Image (spheres, grey):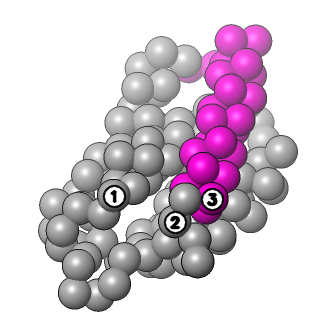
Amino acid sequence: MPRHLALVLIVLCGLSVPAQAQDAAAPFDNELQRFAEILGTLHYLRGICGNNEGGKWRNEMQALLDAETPSGERRARMIAGFNRGYNGFQQTYRACTPAATLAIRRYIDEGLKISRDLTARYAN
């Protein structure tokens, strides 16, 4: 399932706003921030659960930033979302547990839903 999330991220990259509007909030910013938070969560949880993915989820976040090219406050909010997801679970889980594994599945499902919804509403 994580491969599907990564593939949908590539589709999301096509949602970038026109260059002149990059500093203004895009209509899908809340969803992108949530998506960034999910990527941060997965980066932490998949790491403690021994999935040997290295920086995969951080790299996905970087790909999202590279495609969206937010600046200023938009960029800061997206990065804060990623960090919030990572730090929130770092404080809760020190080892992989059944609850952590369940959380991974739920966050992958939520990330897929967000990416499908965004693609359906905003992709050309």
Q: Is residue 55 magenta?
A: no
First in sequence: mark 1 or mark 2?
A: 1
Q: Position of residue 62 (x, y in %)?
A: 48, 68
Residue beneath label 3, please? 120
Image quadrant where one finds the N terminus? top right
Q: Residue at x 78, y 42 (%)?
A: 51
Counting residues from the start of the chain, the first of labels 1 and 3 encountered is 1
Seen from the viewer's position, the closer of residues 14 and 50 is: 14
Up-down relation of residue 2 to residue 19 (above or below) = above
Q: Is residue 82 left or right of residue 12?
A: left
- Disc 1 to disc 2: CB gap under 8 Å: yes
Instruction: Identify the residue position indicated by label 2 in the image.
Output: 122
Mark 1 nearby-residue class (10 Å; few <14, some 14–19, many ≥20): few
Q: Is residue 91 visible?
A: yes
Near mark 3 (Cα within 10 A), the count class, few <14, some 14-19 or many ≥20, is few
Amino acid type of disc 1? Pro
